[in-house]
Image (tube, rainbow, N blue to C red):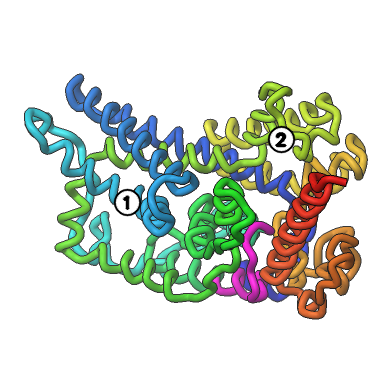
Amino acid sequence: MHWVLAITNSCNLLKYVTKFSCDIFGFYVAFIYLQKGIQVLTQQVGDGPFYLSIVTALLVLTVGYICGVIGTSSIFQRHIRRFIEDYGTPLTLIFFTGFVQIGKMQQISLKTLPVSKSFYPTTDRSWFVPFWNVSASDVLIAIPFAILLTILFYFDHNVSSLIAQDTEYPLRKPAGFHWDIFLLGITTGISGILGIPFPNGLIPQAPFHTKALCVTQIHSDLELDNSKKIKEENNFSHVVEQRVSNLAQGLLTLATMTQPLLAVLHLIPQGVLAGLFFVMGVKALEENGITYKILFMIRDRTLTTSSEPLLNVQRSKIWQFVSIQVFGFGATFAITQTIAAVGFPIIIFLLIPCRIWLIPKLFTDQELKFLDRPTASSFTMISVGGICGEGDGENADRVNDPVIQAYHLDLSPVNDRRSGVLMSVERNKIEYTERFDQEESKRNELPV
């Protein structure tokens, strides 16, 4: 089925997927992580293990979250901050795996990560699932579930790819959505024969991976104060686009199936894993657009900067937009708690036509300009026909800004459709504007 989707260019429908649908799905995934963490804790037997698991999970959440905060703060040297942000969470897991062995805590029997023998299925069977023994009636029964799974993978994998190629990441290499879905069909088939979990893109791991590959640039302009320098540092100059890190992750996953590493993984308490789920869920919620809009609505208006884009929209319209998103999340999350959980991909897929036909009737184009936006840049969406509403995308990445023209900037490299170059031009525009304002203020201070 994945091959049929790839051959028929079904990924062209991604031009209609905006942050509206992605935020709802990301919100749903974040709560699934939080729910999974709670479920792991409730499986602990006895008061001692239950209490220690809760404390450990909350400590992992606290330390893991602090590591992310340090990455965006001004303490330590920037390379140290980046190291803590990228590797703080796995190091936290290692630390608290040993932490529960300190003092009297080692006397408490905690449930740990269950493992099996190396390169051996968890159940008593051979490597290959005996699909040749499946009857024709069972195949017919499985077809509807296969369709639902295909819908889920189509949306989940492509949305995670879109979010991983968000407009904030200055990518230079083009996307390959059709080829990705074709390869996903191959890996899904192999996984089905082996009876292992199906591999596909995930939220929030995919965007976290892209963010970890981003390179920041510091401007050594002496006219800028330190706060401006810190703000510039958080702007990405480019992304290290390569395949080594993905290959390394796959090889490391394969290595964890060997007996030495299986023995090490078996030492990880389930309370630590619950804390990891909490960290992933909280980080996903923190970076979600729904959370951002809710925080904007409850924030003190006097502390809201005048440059906030949402100030251009009536607050009632923002609440209406957020309410629709929360309703979509609630419907998706609710169905997964029932016996009809297998049908939740349909609810997720219906978000696309809802955005195409329903939302434009409730909001004006000017309001949607601030409430919603394309997930990826025009450069990324070229392979699926461009962004809906931007024509054929031929001039989507051309810059026509009076501020840039006023300073006679050379815009010839901008027309190569590389979003990384566009980011550089935008930074140059900001620099020139700030310098111009500073020069004007100095002239005004001179005595007449």
129 vs 81: above or below? below
Q: Quadrant of residue 400?
A: bottom right
Give the extent of the magenta segment.
167-183
Neighbor class of circle 2 (other Cα within 10 Å; few <14, some 14-19, many 20+) is: many
423 vs 286: above or below? below
What is the CA distance from the residue labelled 1 to the residue labelled 2? 32 Å
Mark 1 touches mark 2? (CB < 8 Å): no
364 vs 107: above or below? below
Q: Secondary structure at mark 2?
A: helix
Residue 346 location, x and y as percent? 67, 46
Q: Quadrant of residue 335?
A: top right
Q: Secondary structure at mark 1?
A: helix
For residue 112, the mark is none
**Observer-nearest of 309 and 334:** 309
- As drawn, is 403 to the left or to the right of 96? right
Residue displayed at 26% across by 63% down: 256
- As drawn, is 67 to the left or to the right of 314? left
Residue at image mark 2? 325
Residue displayed at 66% across by 43% down: 23
Residue displayed at 12% across by 30% down: 105
Residue displayed at 75% across by 51% down: 438
Label 2 sits on what residue type?
Gln
- As drawn, is 83 to the left or to the right of 209? left
Whether residue 280 is visible, yes or no, is yes
Closer to the camera: disc 1 or disc 2? 1
- As drawn, is 105 to the left or to the right of 355? left
Residue at image mark 1? 90
Whether residue 10 is visible, yes or no, is no
Residue 80 location, x and y as percent? 37, 55
Residue 199 location, x and y as percent? 47, 62
**Observer-nearest of 230 and 24:** 230
Residue 306 location, x and y as percent? 77, 35
